[in-house]
Amino acid sequence: MANYEGEPPVPNLVDWRLGLEAIHHPLGRQLRENPDPYAVAASLGLPIPSYVKFGSPDEFLADTEAGLRPLKARGVANYYVGLRPLREDLPKYRNEEPLAHTEVAPYIRDHITPEHGKQYVLRIAEYVVAVCGAVVVINPSGSEHIDMVMGDLGPLATGRARPEYQAVTDQFTGVRRYYEAAAGVSQQKQLGEDHTIITPDIRTAIARGMSRIPRLGNGMRDPRTPGRYELAIVRHFNKLDPVFVDAQPDGPRTHPYALPETPLY
């Protein structure tokens, strides 16, 4: 949870979720993090980074070379380490800068004590350097809202940064419009195609990513699967590609990430 200058302190996400569960259990339950968000994204057919998963850090540390071999075979040179705890009183860890293969095991040992070696789920993945990152929320009605930042997605996804840009999709025409986030969609002029930051290449990559989110039916006008998605736009050679790093599709009866159908701005 972010705490901006001049604002009162806010509780951490666990405290917030526990309080929310007390008054709205289905909504609070949805805030529990999946230990393997890449697997959820992959199950929806979404593009994800190359990665390997271990039931515990101990499992990987028993033979680090064997653990990294699948990623090395795919040409991965920069590594991301994600350590998600199985207990809510333990912190989660992830590296903010890419690691070389020789730095992966030391990073894990530096953050996980031997007594907690079986209290974490470990993901090791290709470290993707994002040109921009987006948090996508799709309503049950089919409306789509995108918050964006340039560069790393992490601060936006974890609430440590506010969005720099936003996009909304017209439910009837399918046209996606981009705005600066500061003033709110209803007060800000739409960004033109000649915008120097939200360029046509970025818009095309986002459109390609959004097109991968499955629809609820077979028709082109059927809404996409409601939920919350985290999308990084990365550069592969001279092309921008979408990569999903989290996917939290809603269940058939609960829609915890639904946004108001009318703007709040």
Image (cartoon, rainbow, N blue to C red):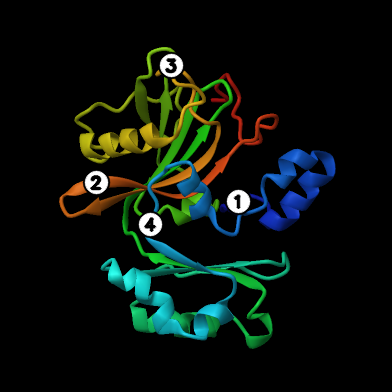
Residue corresponding to mark 2: 240
Q: Which mark is residue 49?
A: 4
* Residue toward you, 72 or 191: 72
Asked whether the residues under the numbered discs 2 and 4 touch, taking CB atoms below 8 Å apart as contact, a structural biologist would say: no
- Crowding around mark 3 (Cα neighbors within 10 Å: few <14, some 14 to 19, many 20+) is some
Q: Are marks 4 and 3 in contact (CB under 8 Å)?
A: no
Mark 3 residue element = loop
Q: Which residue is mark 3?
A: 221
Can see residue 54? Answer: yes
- Do the CB atoms of the residues marked 3 and 2 lie less than 8 Å apart? no
* CA gap, disc 4 and disc 3: 29 Å
C-alpha gap between disc 4 and disc 1: 38 Å
Say left or right for 63 vs 3: left
Of the pair 238 and 253, the residue shown nearer to us: 253
Pointers 1 and 3 in contact (C-beta within 8 Å): no
User: Which class describes the residues within 10 Å of circle 4: few (<14), some (14-19), or many (20+)?
Assistant: some
In terms of secondary structure, where does tag 2 sit?
strand
Residue 257 position by quadrant: top right
Q: Is residue 129 left or right of residue 259?
A: left
The residue lying toward the viewer, choosing from 3 and 139, is 139
